[in-house]
Image (cartoon, rainbow, N blue to C red):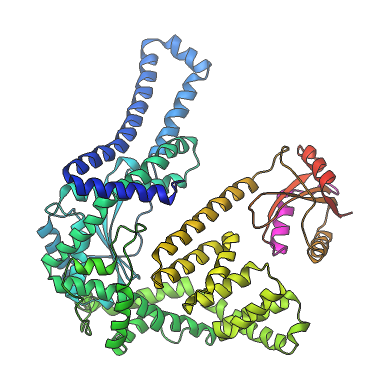
Amino acid sequence: MTAFKEETFVALVERSEKDAARDIKAYRLKLAAFALLGYGVIFSLVALLVLLLGGTLWVAFLSSGLFLLLLSKKIIFLIAAAIWTLLRALWVPFDAPSGYRLERRHFPKLFAQIDELATTLSALRIHQVILEDSLNAAVVQHPRFGLLGGQRNSLILGLQLLLVLSPQEMRSVLAHEFGHLSGNHSRFNAWIYRVRLSWQRIMDGFEEQGAWGAKLLRRFFDWYSPTFSAYSFALARRNEYESDQVAAQLTSAETAAKALLRSYTTASFLEERYWQPFHDQADLEPQPPVPPFRGLADFLKTSPPPAEELSARTAGELAQQTHYADTHPALKDRLAALVPAPPPLAASGQSAAEAWLGERFDALIAHFDEQWQRAYLPHWQRRHQRVQEAKVKLAELRQQAPQALSDDQFWDLATATNELEGDAAAQPLYLSYLERDPGSIGAAYQLGRILAAEGDEAALPYLEKAFDHPHTLGDAARWGYQLLLDKGKEEEAQLWWAKALGKEEQQQAAAEAAASLSLDDALEAPSLSAPQLAQLRQILSEYRHLGPIWLAQKPVPGQAYPTLVFAYGRKGLFGRAEKLLDYLVQRLDWDAQFFMVGLWSKGRRLAKRVREAGIQVLD
């Protein structure tokens, strides 16, 4: 979204916290002025559009001759194009929230809770209530008129959250969400909260637009949006604490604390005890034995988390520290602001889903099960087929001595073992593969991941090696960061994360350099192995209408994979570069960037340089 570096963002956040602590009124005044700056830019552009349009019409009214002159010189078309471009840039598209829309007449108990809380808090009007399948709840604002506003407010309720929390705990969650938009609580805070979310969504919208007007606006908002987000961070975090207090006032401090605790601890419990075992059944069954959400509802009734497990999960969540990556404070800080000590969690009894969804509860469960079937059953069946094939391949590979296997076969042995028998069985195989190929980033990542999951700091050198490829950088960074935090080494964790960010910047720069090709770029012979060249030649020989082909490589510092440039000739009238490129990408399972230039086309000067610097791969 932006080129902001983490240290710049953190410095602005720290500055906002100091300003707020020193003089909250002055901080809010400065923040309001900064918020209005963004709107000032937008409305200035709107005024510019009006002036352009009005001026053109006024010229036409005063002098038809001058208007015809503007028309003949095409100036009028340039003005029209400018107006259209700016309008397109201002009209940032936003996707409306999707899910199952709940109607008031069908769910009177739910809407009674919503109406009571909205009235008590003088909250903004909720235009629609959407049920989705998540373990979450939120109020989402959807601008109907792009940057010009016209907010439509949607309350998003997660079915899993309704199944997990009691009615009172769910009421506390709703009170928290409404607290962000409350008029009674703090109109200024609610306004800043909405503006903050709006700029974030506007930036996402600009990223999806290619018009030059949007690019011009994006240059300003690339600076403005993250700067505003950072400087408003202190208020956003205060809002979380204040919304927690709203929840406590409208239920009780203990209920608000229990709602937080149960939400945090149940997420990991459900993932490990229900969803992971549920999906693992795809290894054995071509169809799910039970519908997923019907199964989840029954699981929560028959297998609630034991008290000792809840206690252990609570301790794990309480060990997490508040961080600048999220405006939400850590659980321990939120609880400390509500209660002297974390309250014990008992079985919640009747769920909010059962209490508020009434007689339509079973129908809604069936709806989400059908939705899951349509969206995910094909993935389930593909996984089942893949596992059956992996079992056959694993059996075949194990019939051979490990030292007799090629590197590719040994890698298949390791990954199939990992998929079918787990990390412990695969770990020595990944280690053996690294002995065969010390430069293997994939094996280093898998070893690092396995060791990190065991809490072993020996994972760190392997994970750092995985920084060298963009496909593994993000996961490797997260595994190492969490491992260091779990070991209480927060300062080392921050240094680790900073190193990963630096590596990401290098890889982004390399990717940008590799994404284009010009006559000024250096070229050299390709750094492909003999088996790779043999594979390439075989695949090219099977493609019809090809003449001679040469191959060179564009050297890109910091790039983890090669940028290959083909210069090719054709036979007959057929020989489109796009078709040949698609053919190679489909047939070659290579991590590489490809370019095609024709020996006869307008790129023939570049093709000549490929012939001079590279090698011939097809006669």
Q: Quadrant of residue 270?
A: bottom left
Q: Is residue 290 left or right of residue 180?
A: right
Q: Compared with residue 312, is residue 487 higher up or lower down, i.e. above or below? A: above
Magenta-drawn stretch contains 583: yes
**Vertical arrangement, residue 611 with respect to residue 128, above or below:** above
| Lateral position of residue 592 relative to residue 484, left or right | right
Please tell me which residue lies in front, 323 or 91. 323
Q: Is residue 176 left or right of residue 227?
A: left
Looking at the picture, how far across and down is residue 410, in whole percent? 70, 79
Q: Quadrant of the C terminus?
A: bottom right
- Name the residue rendered at 74%, 43% in the picture: 522
603 drawn magenta = no
Measured as percent of width and height from the top left, residue 525 is found at: 80, 51
Res 198 visible: no
Q: Is residue 470 above or below residue 399?
A: above
Magenta residues, as a range? Answer: 570-590
Position in image of residue 97 (x %, y %): 34, 58
The one of 367 and 8 positioned closer to us in this rendering: 8
- Residue 143 drawn at (x, y percent): 31, 47
